[in-house]
Image (cartoon, helix red, strand yellow):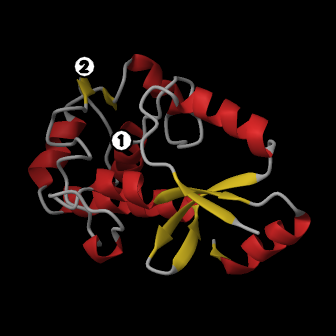
Amino acid sequence: MLDYIYIGDHHHNRDKFFQKVNKRVGKGNYFLAFSAGKKLYSWNWGMQLYEDAYLSFLTKDISLVKKLVSMCDVCEINNKDLESYLNFKHQKQDKDHNQDIAIRRCLIRLGVWFKGTDLLSIPGTEFDHSKIPFHLPHLLRKPDSLKSIKSWLDGNRLMVVASSSEDKAQLAEIMVS
């Protein structure tokens, strides 16, 4: 039987959380995913929507893109974030940092890149995912008051526990990749 656990934000406990899960259900017996309506979507699909929300935001105001381009790069926690570059799965700190990765990926999609000398720390700025409306608010399971990008990540992200081969086959049949 498949178990669904909404996981929200781990804050600074991501590694401890996954250690507990590995101990409890076994490594390889769970999968990160996103739910939208009555459908289950792959983690990659969910993160693509996260990135698309940033792209939607940036294309509505070119001055925001110009501000980003005037920086040397962006970070969410510190300059170690830069090591992840464009890879959401390359998380080397105890807290996920997806905002900086999404912004870099959007700049590439827009055909521009950083040219400045200053590093922009995203939290608290207009680029903070808690301050930007999600572009598809009808998909939000638990919207915050702004219906933000952060509410997509925290409200729709879940873990699917599939311990047996039958569970994994069932998951493969129902998940949209």
Query: Residue drawn at (52%, 26%), measured in percent from left and top?
Result: 83
Q: Nearer the viewer, residue 39 or 88?
A: 39
Image coordinates of residue 111 in percent, x first then y, are: 35, 53
- Please determine whether, in this image, residue 30 is positioned above or below residue 36: above
Q: State how far apart marks 1 and 2 are (Cα).
A: 20 Å
Mark drawn on residue 17 = none
Q: Secondary structure at mark 2?
A: loop
Q: Nearer the viewer, residue 165 or 136?
A: 165
Residue 117, label in figure: 2
Image coordinates of residue 49 in percent, x first then y, are 42, 64
Count of residue discs:
2
Q: Quadrant of residue 37?
A: bottom left
Residue shown at 40% from the left, 18% from the top: 79
CA neighbours of label 2 inside 10 A, class few (<14), some (14 to 19), many (20+): few
Q: Which residue is mark 1?
A: 99
Which one is closest to the eye, mark 1 or mark 2?
1
Pointer 1 with pointer 2, Cβ within 8 A: no
Residue placed furthest toward the right: 165
| Three-letter amino acid code of the residue under disc 1 | Gln
- Choose top left, top right, bottom left or bottom right for residue 156: bottom left
- Residue at the (50%, 42%) spot, across then down: 86
- Image coords of residue 99 (percent x, y): 36, 41
The C terminus sits in image quarter:
bottom right
Asked if residue 57 is positioned above or below residue 94 in the image, the reply reads: below
Residue density around tag 1, few if under 14, some if 14–19, many if 20 or more, within 10 Å: many
* Amino acid type shown at disc 2: Thr
Q: Is residue 45 left or right of residue 116?
A: right
Question: What quarter of the picture does the N terminus occupy?
Answer: bottom right
Q: Earlier in the sequence, mark 1 or mark 2?
A: 1
Relative side of 14 to 29, left or right: left
